[in-house]
Image (cartoon, rainbow, N blue to C red):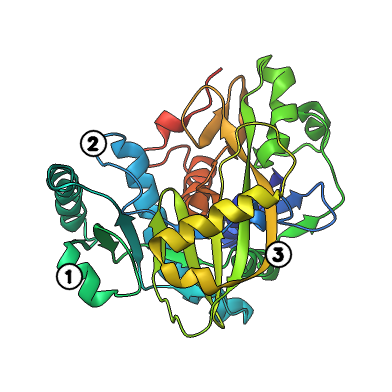
Amino acid sequence: MSKIVIVGCGVVGAAIAYELSLVSSLENLDITVLEAQSQVGQVSTKAALGVLMGACGGSKTKNEALSTLRLASLLRFESLVPELEAKTGIKIPYNCHGILLLFQDLEDADQLETAAKWQELISDRGSQGFYMKWLEPDLLRSQYPHLQATAAVHSFADRSIHPSCLMQALVKGAELNGVKFICDRPVHNLSELDQLEADWIIVTAGLGSRALMQPELKKDILTSVGGQAIKAYLPDLNLKNVIYGDDTNIIPIGQDQYWIGATVEFKRLTLPRNENIDLLMQTAIKFCPAFAQAQILSTWAGDRPRPRTQGAPILGYVPNRPNTLIATGHYRNGILMAPVTAQVIKDLILEGKCDLPWQKQQLKS
């Protein structure tokens, strides 16, 4: 029997545990997840908004490998959500109306240039099976009169999902398949894990991965980037799509409620802050003036792990530790990339290789 220990249980750790649990009986795996907090999913995952911006989230030519990973993960959600719901009985809110990317204040020349750039990506995505459409001003106004923008892209294949419900379902699904979850179990260094005599160690501890890797690499691999979001109530708008503009999302979550966010805070500021509430509401009103009448219900903040010296995420083997894998530093795409991360880790453990293009995300020693 192969003993696998997963360190950290945000959405990435939970997805890996679930993916491995699907083959645990066939491969004779003993899987244990160690979580430092009193409950799973209490750090970055708890603060996440669950926007799955895979098709419209990056240029194919800029980083084709990363785009391939994002698209593979986006596709996995289409089967993962009904699979988890059927297995666990947990309803996972999953918005399939797509994402509207809004552009404002484009002059004629800028609009032509922007449209040309997006048409190239729209064509690329179409050849890959992901439908996107450029919306000229007249079409945008006629289809979405409540929005205020010069032009837009409708990415039909992109999604949003409720992170906490996804997290609950992943954990329950893994537990039903025999995975053990142990909370209030911090890990202070990798040497401590060696005493557990595991065949494989998988580090998915988010920002907690910094302390675990520091003695091994003699450097800090992650930095913390804060973010704040709000929940607002606005009756009768009936917004279906996720709206994205000025690096801010408006996400319908049902019952006339919306998540709006999140800010990007590189400076170490105390969060949440009232100034951010005003900033987020101003952005929402800019693209959808009806939000001037919205009632703010709550605000919250969290930290995301961002790699210091390489692109997000960090994925693959830990240098000089052939039985240790790491999957962390997903920054703002932890929810989106959790399924594909789980697939890569599973393949590396079971096959020693993975056909997905994960190598550029390998941890730099």
Residue that numbered label 1 is attached to: 139
Evaluate whether residue 36 shows in this view: yes
Residue 243 point in image, percent of width and height: 40, 63
Question: Hey, which quadrant is residue 157 in on the image?
Answer: bottom left
Q: Nearer the viewer, residue 268 or 149?
A: 149
Residue 64 point in image, percent of width and height: 29, 38
Question: Hey, which quadrant is residue 59 in on the image?
Answer: top left
The numbered disc on residue 86 is none
**Under tag 3, what secondary structure?**
loop
10 Å crowding of disc 3: few (<14), some (14-19), many (20+): some
Q: Is residue 112 left or right of residue 32?
A: left
Residue that numbered label 3 is attached to: 178
Disc 2 versus disc 3: nearer the observer: 2
Q: Residue furthest top?
A: 218
Callout 1 amino acid: Leu
Residue that numbered label 2 is attached to: 61
State the CA–CA distance, disc 1 to disc 3.
Answer: 52 Å
Q: Nearer the viewer, residue 351 or 228?
A: 228
Circles 2 and 3, Cβ within 8 Å, touching? The answer is no
> Who's the residue at 14% across and 52% down the image?
123
Residue 204 point in image, percent of width and height: 65, 42
Residue 265 point in image, percent of width and height: 60, 38
In the rendered view, tell whether residue 311 sits above or below residue 170: above
> Who's the residue at 41% across and 41% down the image?
354
Disc 1 versus disc 3: nearer the observer: 1
Circles 1 and 3, Cβ within 8 Å, touching? The answer is no
Evaluate whether residue 30 shows in this view: no
Callout 2 amino acid: Thr
